[in-house]
Amino acid sequence: MNRGSLLGIVLNIGGAPGEGYIGGRYWRDPGAFHNGFKGLCSVFVTAAFAFAGTELVGLAAAETANPRKSLPTAIKQVFWRITLFYIVALTLIGLLVPYTEQRLLLGEDKPARASPFVIAIENAGIDVLPSIMNVVILISVLSVGNSSVFGSSRTLAALADQNQAPRILSYVDRKGRPLIAIMVSSSVGLLSYLADLQQEDEVLDWLVAISGLSSIFTWASICLAHIRFRQAWAYRGHKVLELAFRSQVGVYGSWLGLIINLLILIAQFWIGAWPVGYTHMTSVELAKSFFLVYLAAPVVIIFFIGHWFWHRTSTIRVADMDVDTGRRDFNLPILIAQEKEEKKNWPKWKKVYKYMC
């Protein structure tokens, strides 16, 4: 478990001077879910924006020497990191900081104190840790920027190879780096200078509106692609054992993920059309609220229809899918036999560990 989660547990059970045992106090008063189910649905865009990027582990498979060995471990570690750094940490923050805390709202005097992690530490009366936490947050932002440039540049290069983006973006140097795509992706980071504007909060809201919900479309398409790929894989006579990575939840997990993502899109339309307190809002405020929540949907639909008209694409049947072109020849029978022989000598703890991680 990460140090932030351990610190949160210590503070919650009474490790903060003068606070005593907190437990579920703030979940009872003022409550765990502000504005009930509608309030929960209203933060889906922000949550999707925060979770975006975890799918980038799939892009690393193309640049991995042995994806059968490294890819399963990387994907499982992403799952556990999300569980520990997101779900566990945010649950503890919900126990330590009530939603009525005024410092959660950004202010011009000390905007850095808006972080709930910093607020929880300040409430504990620890003077040094807030600055350390801010450093950790800054390092995390740099890490996110690094992974975003990696993912977007590779995506642009792949689109250029398929004639769906300017061909110049497909240029790759001798070391395998798509330099033009990297420069284009990095230039988008110049938008950070918009933070110098007085309307920075509004600009950030619209940027989140454009990009936040798009990750829901991304994951829905990933689930659908996995379902159809497994259908084509079986149709071609391949076995699941031949795959470099096999999801523990299989196709059923993808069906569940697809349904949940579609339900989130429906819930977001409901929140956008009838937001919290919509009876007291003007028509202009309602329109702005809708597009702040659902702007990514028309953007994705417009681009999808535009791509369909431009390229005249059609739905590919399972029988026509090509799952063999571009595959690496690893001499699978020998590799599978070696893997089975290696696993036989593993102790039980290692088998459990490798299954989980």
Image (cartoon, rainbow, N blue to C red):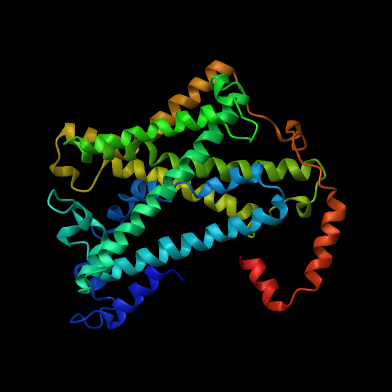
Instruction: Residue 93: tell me if it is visible.
Output: yes
Q: Position of residue 308 (x, y in %)?
A: 54, 21
Residue 4, picture quadrant: bottom left
Q: Position of residue 62 (x, y in %)?
A: 65, 42
On the picture, is 119 further left or further right than 317?
left
Q: Position of residue 247 (x, y in %)?
A: 64, 56
On the picture, is 18 further left or further right than 88?
left
Residue 232, picture quadrant: top right
Q: Residue at x 43, y 25 (%)?
A: 302
Residue 29, picture quadrant: bottom left
On the picture, is 161 further left or further right than 141?
right
Residue 196 drawn above or below residue 261: above
Residue that extends furthest to the top in the rendered view of this protein: 310
Q: Which quadrant is the C terminus positioned in?
A: bottom right
Q: Residue at x 45, y 42 (%)?
A: 215
Residue 69 drawn above or below residue 315: below
Q: Nearer the viewer, residue 272 or 311?
A: 311
Residue 99 drawn above or below residue 297: below
Q: Position of residue 107 (x, y in %)?
A: 15, 50
Instruction: Residue 216: tell me if it is visible.
Output: no
Q: Residue at x 35, y 44 (%)?
A: 268
Q: Residue at x 28, y 81 (%)?
A: 15
Q: Nearer the viewer, residue 122 or 164?
A: 122
Residue that extends furthest to the front in the rendered view of this protein: 174
For the image shown, how many numbered marks are present on the structure? 0
